[in-house]
Amino acid sequence: MGLEEKLPSGVLLSTVEGLAGYARKGSLWPATFGLACCAIEMMASGAGRYDLARFGMEVFRASPRQADLMIVAGRVSQKMAPILRQIYDQMPGPKWVLAMGACSSSGGMFNNYAIVQGVDHVVPVDIYLPGCPPRPEMLIDALMKLHDQIGDTKLGANRDREVVELERAALVAPHSSEMKGLLR
């Protein structure tokens, strides 16, 4: 039951966007940015038991110029926020960000002046991964969802239109300080 049996007369049709998305999602190179206890779970997901190499992510890059995925694992302090932004700016495009854990997603249990209340105040986040700390299985599931997003990414003028629409939607969304939650 090979690929040639599923294709009528051996012809495969696709678009350039589809081929580029397929190539990108199969070769994500994450940057190492572990800040707290979530980093231990992130390292465990790269070990033999969970093996991120199955998904083309076997090498965590120490240089932001070689990475296209930033996994922010743990709490981000006010002093660390400018460094996080600098590393994000040094990454080549296209680039994606995954906020791993409750602390990086929303500040977690640290509701004080020293911790950034959500890494989305510093860099744009594509996937939020809840938990304290989230298990490696949850990280792999979030990466699979990110793969689906990357596979559907537009190119060229279509991408420019998509970015404008997303920015317009973000501008009309209520600010997080206006939202009512458990702490307000």
Image (cartoon, rainbow, N blue to C red):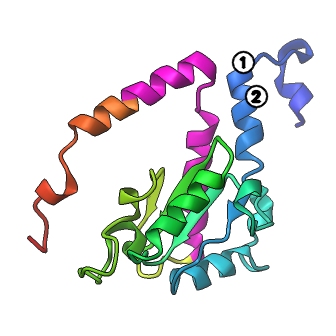
Total labels: the figure holds 2
From the top left corner, tell me how far across and down residue 78 is, in percent: 38, 74
**Where does the image place residue 7, in percent across and percent down from the top left?**
84, 21
Quarter-wise, where is residue 1 in the image? top right
What type is the residue that disc 2 sits on? Leu
Residue at horizontal 61 percent and vertical 64 percent from the top: 140
Q: Residue 56, position in %: x, y?
A: 79, 56
| Disc number for residue 19 | 2
- Residue 141 is one of the magenta-drawn residues: yes
Magenta stretch containing residue 123, yes or no? no
**Marks 1 and 2 close (CB-CB < 8 Å):** yes
At 70% from the left and 26% from the top, the residue drawn is 18
Q: For this rendering, which residue is in front, 111 or 180?
A: 111
Give the secondary structure at mark 1. Answer: loop
Instruction: Determine which residue is flagged by label 1.
Output: 15
Q: Quadrant of residue 77?
A: bottom left
Work out whether 64 lies above or below 182: above
